[in-house]
C-alpha cells in the first residue's frame, strides 16, 4: 500500500504579483512566485497535498526543526525555450538526492508521485514566472523540515514538504576569490556533508565571514583530517584544470553529489577533454601554479552552472589565475545551458518536459 494520499487541493491566488515584478532587477532568493506546494507527513502518511497562494505559515515555537535542525532541501531550475515550452534539467537526480538526504537525517522518504505531481502542477500554474532567454530561469527550492511541536531531542513524528520558486537571472562577470581553508571544515567523515542538510550551510557562514575579512568571497573546503585535500568551493563542487586535464575530487561522505558536477564530467568526457576524478592535494595545485600549469579553477552548481574562480589564497599568499581564451569553463557552460534551454539536441536525455 502506498504511504500517501494523493488528492491535491488547489487554491489560486486572487491577484498575481507578476505585474509588479521588475525581472531585470531581482536579487537571488528574495522574490517568490504566486504559489507554493505543501504536503504534510503525520501518522506515517504523506497527506493533504495542496497548492496555495505563496505566503507565511504559522508554526509552534517548539517546532522540532528550529531546535534540532532536522531539515533538508534541494535546488533546481526550470527553463523556458523560445516556443514557451518549460523544461527541467535532470529532476530525477534531485528527487533521488532529496531522499538520500532525508534518510541520513532520519526523515521519511518522499514518494515520487508527490514530488513530481506537486512540482509539475506548481510550474504549470506559475509558468508565467519563467521568462525565456538564456540566463532567465525559475529557481525551485523543495525542502522538508521536522514540524512536530515538542522539544524532545528525537526524530520528529511530523514533517512538512514544501516547494517554493523564485525567478532568477544569471549574473556574469565579477571576480570570485577564494581562501583555501587551513582551519575550518565543512564536513567530516561519517557526518552529513553529502546530504543537503540545512545545518551544513549555517556552519559555513562564520568561516566564510572571516574569509571575507581577508578579501575572499568563498572558501575552498579541505578535508577535515589534515586540510590536505581540496573538496568543495563554498556551496559548489570544484574543478581544477592542470594543463589540459580537468581534475575533481571523487565523491565521499563529505562531498555533495552535484548534478552539475556529474553533468560536467559526462560532458567533458564526451568532448574528449581528459578528466580525472581523483583526490587532489593543496600542494599539487600550488606546485602546478608555480610551474604555470594551473590554467583554471571553477565551481559548479545549479545556481551558477559554472563559475570561474579568479584567485586563491593559501598560507597568506595570493595566487592569481589569469583568464584564458577558450576556457573549459566557458565551453562546458555553453554546452550545458544549450541543453537546458532546448537550443541543441539532448544526447544524454537530461531534459525533462513540464508541459
Ligand atoms: C547543492 C550543492 C552543490 C551543487 O549541486 P548541484 O546539484 O550541481 O546544484 C555542491 N556542493 C554543495 C555543498 C551543495 O550544497
Image (cartoon, rainbow, N blue to C red):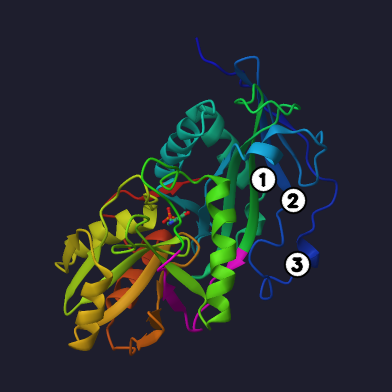
Left or right of residue 183: residue 161: right
Label 3 vs label 1, nearer the camera: 3
Marks 1,2: beta carbons within 8 A: yes
Q: Secondary structure at mark 2?
A: loop
The answer for how far apart the CA atoms under marks 1 and 2 are is 9 Å
Mark linked to residue 21: 3
Q: Position of residue 184 (x, y in %)?
A: 46, 62
Which of the two residues, 336 or 27, is positioned nearer the viewer here? 27
- Give, as a single range, the part of the protein colored magenta: 168-183
Query: Ligand 1 lies in which image quarter?
Result: bottom left
The answer for how far apart the CA atoms under marks 3 and 1 are is 17 Å
Q: Position of residue 80 (x, y in %)?
A: 52, 59
Q: Is mark 3 within 8 Å of ligand 1?
A: no
Give the labeled residue for mark 2: 34
Q: Residues within 10 Å of mark 3 (few under 14, many from 20)?
A: some
Q: Residue at x 52, y 54 (%)?
A: 78
Q: Position of residue 187 (x, y in %)?
A: 43, 51
Amino acid at each position: 500500500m502506498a504511504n500517501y494520499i494523493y488528492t491535491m487541493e488547489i487554491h489560486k491566488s486572487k491577484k498575481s504579483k507578476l505585474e509588479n515584478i521588475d525581472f531585470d532587477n531581482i536579487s537571488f532568493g528574495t522574490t517568490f512566485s504566486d504559489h507554493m506546494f505543501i504536503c504534510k507527513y503525520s501518522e506515517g502518511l504523506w497527506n493533504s497535498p495542496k497548492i496555495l497562494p505563496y505566503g507565511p505559515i504559522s508554526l509552534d515555537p517548539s517546532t522540532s526543526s528550529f531546535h534540532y535542525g532536522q531539515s533538508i532541501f534541494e535546488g533546481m531550475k526550470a527553463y523556458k525555450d523560445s516556443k514557451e515550452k518549460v523544461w527541467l534539467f535532470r529532476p530525477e537526480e534531485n528527487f533521488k538526492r532529496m531522499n538520500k538526504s532525508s534518510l541520513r537525517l532520519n526523515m521519511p522518504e518522499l514518494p515520487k508521485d508527490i514530488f513530481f505531481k506537486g512540482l509539475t502542477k506548481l510550474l504549470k500554474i506559475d509558468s508565467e514566472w519563467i521568462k525565456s532567454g538564456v540566463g532567465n530561469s525559475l529557481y525551485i527550492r523543495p525542502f522538508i523540515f521536522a514540524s512536530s511541536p515538542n522539544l524532545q531531542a528525537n526524530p520528529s513524528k511530523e514533517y512538512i514538504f514544501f516547494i517554493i520558486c523564485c525567478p532568477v537571472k544569471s549574473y556574469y562577470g565579477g571576480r570570485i576569490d577564494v581562501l583555501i581553508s587551513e582551519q575550518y571544515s565543512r564536513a567530516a567523515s561519517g557526518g552529513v556533508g553529502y546530504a543537503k542538510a540545512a545545518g551544513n550551510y549555517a556552519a559555513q557562514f562564520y568561516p566564510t565571514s572571516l574569509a571575507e575579512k581577508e578579501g575572499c568571497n568563498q572558501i575552498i573546503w579541505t578535508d577535515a583530517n589534515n586540510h590536505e585535500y581540496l573538496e568543495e568551493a563554498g556551496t559548489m563542487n570544484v574543478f581544477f584544470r592542470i594543463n589540459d586535464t580537468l581534475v575533481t575530487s571523487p565523491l565521499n561522505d563529505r562531498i555533495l553529489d552535484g548534478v552539475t558536477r556529474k553533468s560536467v564530467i559526462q560532458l567533458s568526457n564526451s568532448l574528449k577533454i581528459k578528466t580525472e576524478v581523483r583526490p587532489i592535494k593543496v600542494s599539487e595545485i600550488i606546485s602546478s601554479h608555480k610551474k604555470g600549469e594551473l590554467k583554471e579553477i571553477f565551481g559548479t552548481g545549479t545556481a551558477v552552472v559554472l563559475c570561474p574562480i579568479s584567485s586563491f589564497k593559501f598560507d597568506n599568499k595570493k595566487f592569481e589565475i589569469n583568464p584564458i581564451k577558450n576556457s573549459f569553463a566557458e565551453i562546458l557552460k555553453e554546452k550545458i545551458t544549450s541543453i537546458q534551454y532546448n537550443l541543441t539536441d539532448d544526447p544524454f536525455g537530461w531534459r525533462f518536459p513540464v508541459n
